Image (tube, coloured by chain):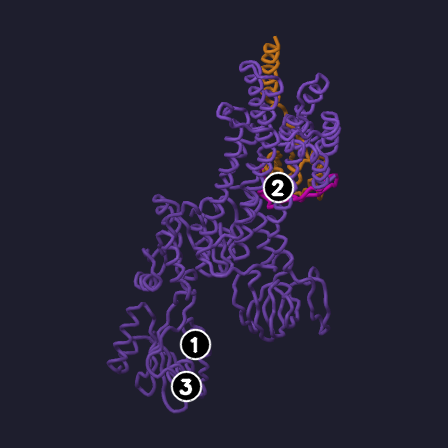
Chain colours: A orange, B purple
Amino acid sequence: MDKLIVLVVGVAAIGFIVWWFFGHHEASAAEAQVSEQAQSIDIVVNGGYSPEHVVLKKGTPAVLNFTRKDASGCLDHVVFPDFGINQELPRGEKVAVEINTEQAGEFSWACGMDMFHGKIVIQ
Amino acid sequence: MSTTKRFIIALVFSLPMLVQMILMPWGFMLPGAQYTQFVLTTVVMVVAASPFLRSAWASFKKHHSNMDTLVAIGTITAYCYSIYAMFTNQAVFFESAALVVTFVLLGQVFEERMRKSASSAVEKLINLQAKDAEVIRDGQSMVIPLSEVVVNDIIRVKPGQKIAVDGVITEGTSTIDESMVTGESMPVVKKAGDQVIGATMNSNGTFLFRAEKVGNETMLSQIVDLVKKAQTSHAPIQNLTDKVSDIFVPIVLIIAILTFMVWFAILGASMAVSLIFAVSVLVIACPCALGLATPTALMVGTGRSAKLGILIKNGEVLEAVNDVKTIVFDKTGTITVGKPVVTDIVGDQEATLKIAAALEQSSEHPLAEAILNRAEEDDVKQTFAVTDFAAVEGKGVTAKLDNGQAFVGNAKLLADYDIEADLNAAMVKLQNEAKTVVLVGFNNQIVGLIAIQDAPKETSAAAIQALKDQGLKTIMLTGDNVRVAEAVAKTVGIDQVIADVLPSEKANYVQSFQQAGKVAFVGDGINDAPALTVADVGIAMGSGTDIAIDSGGIILVKNDLRDVSTALELSKKTFNRIKLNLFWAFVYNVLGIPVAAGVFYAAGLTLSPELAGLAMAFSSLSVVISSLLLSKTHLKSRTQPVIAAE
């Protein structure tokens, strides 16, 4: 009987994991607040990035404000390979990362260990 | 709370349990048995492990998972089961939960420190800058911070001071140590009109220079920018780990559940034994090492090469270098100096040079410049009064000196003057070496010959030999004629020469070589830019045009061709280190998981959760250490590296 319960619960748990992690889930996206000379957006770092997708306007200087709430060592740096940025994010501090928006396109960013990802779309 | 503090707390509270574990065979038990263990572990879980749990939960809500997910689920499972077991009087394994947390934190503490030292190259470079500069404005001398220096400021540099920005010397001479920026170990003598580089060290003289590039424009700033980009760049080999990291953790969770199900339901093991296997799987599988393998090696490798004056732009270049079979060179400015110099003087050295210098002193022809430079080098002062200066159409020039008529010109002058047999033989020999021969005559007699050539750099032959030793095929592409090209190729030992190439054709040739394997192209001019881009690895000389530098994947700041082989060697070493790191990281996970799951139980090979935790900590640590060792590896093509900022 015990064994049967374990098998049923185990299979159910596996099903849940597959659905939860591999199923299609909307990533949170946001557009930056744009004024005449600048655009900025706040990104909370907690078990990943929220929002994960950021849309920026081409040609206007942009600032992404990262605030890390997560204690994980995994998220203590944010890396933008296309821009040569490798910025430390001290926990609980708002850190501004300036992005050059002269070129349109999709640019990804990642945590220092390349486990969590985010994306900027400049258009 | 910092990772270090969390580690210390976890260590202090799990130490008694570790002691008990070791002394158990001799019958040692902690007073209070499992109740003491329960209290100790609870402290570890609440204080040291809760950040793992919070992080795991936060990412779980976003449908993500990370290494903390595995640590959190593993330790929570062991902890909760042990509480249940404690109340039902079964065997507990609190110590597993506590020790796993301790070991994982131990790994993180070390890894944090190592990662800092791996990324310190850029900071060291920035710290090279001078803090202030003595500027002379309106005749007033004042010391101002570096940020306030503007273009065209005249700056005074005293012995032992750092040069603030890039510029040109206007007054004075000095010896300057440029090793920190260019990697060139020999100090260079500079005089008025010479370029100086910001952040280099003035040694013995005082001089004034005019600022030409300040702020982000300076060479150092450009280098820092390039190194930063290289260090954060992706190597294509990482694509694999990128893909793996998204699905790895959920798959490990599934494997852990399966492990439990198989042991408990099919093999009929007890609940405790089955759980231990499952927890071990979770703990050993942590993919940190996999994630660290490439970035840390990339950081150390590009940082070290920057110190040697070799800028590698990104991980893609690094990876491409590995398969390069052919290396193609531009001639002018790359293999050769890039401007004509006097190579031979036949006849009375001093007299010949003196007459030639007298006649050429007002000419701006490149050949004249070569002669005048040589006269200056040899300290030959021309003292004649020159009158009746006249050009002989298509042949050369003639003028009246103090005591007679002198002439300088090309071989067509032979129609007008006689030449001695041995001089004639020397001329033919020089011409066969593809040198331009200038005849120097006095009073209707040819007195000497000056041979001029865009000569190979002193280091070119050694550089080509080093590349051949690495098993590479060397090819030279040039717009020059076959004779000149072959003469240069022969002196430096190039395998194959393709001459009379139009600038627009260089890229096509590179493409045709690419059919036989990956090609590196070394060049410096605007006309080299397409070839630098097309080649798998574009190597630009630092003295080259900006456009060439932009097109290149590797930049040789020092302008020394020998750095090509150093660059290739260092790139290969870095890439091999990445592969080695990835291999070990995979081995840990791929071999570790079946062992932890108890697949080899029958053979007596198992892994307890604590050992799994220790192995896990060790795996990320070993990867980071292996990357750091890259800065110490021996380079064959290198004598003594000059380390910046020490």
Q: Name the amino acid type tagged 3.
A: Asp
Instruction: Provide residue B53's location: percent of width, then percent of height.
Output: 69, 29
Instruction: Say which element carries label 1.
Output: helix
Q: Nearer the viewer, residue B280 or B355?
A: B280
Q: Is residue B102 left or right of residue B542?
A: right
**Could you give the CA–CA distance between mark 1 and mark 2, rounded to whole angstroms?**
53 Å
Distance, label 3 to label 1, CA atoms, is 25 Å
Which amino acid, mark 2?
A: Val
Give the total number of marks visible in the rendering. 3
Residue under numbered circle 3: B388
Confirm whether circles 1 and 2 share one chain. no
Which residue ends up furthest to the bottom in the rendered image? B403
Which stretch is magenta? A78-106
Quarter of the figure with residue B294: top right
Front-most of residues A27 and B360 = A27
Say above or below: B74 vs B622. Answer: above
Q: Percent from the top left, x then y, of residue A21?
A: 60, 24
Residue B374 is tagged as 1
Q: Is residue B405 above or below residue A36?
A: below
> Height in image: B57 above or below B228?
above
**Which marked residue is nearer to the observer: mark 3 or mark 1?**
1
Image height of B376 relative to B521, above or below: below
Q: Can residue A33 be seen in this view?
A: no
Foreground disc of the pair 1, 2: 2
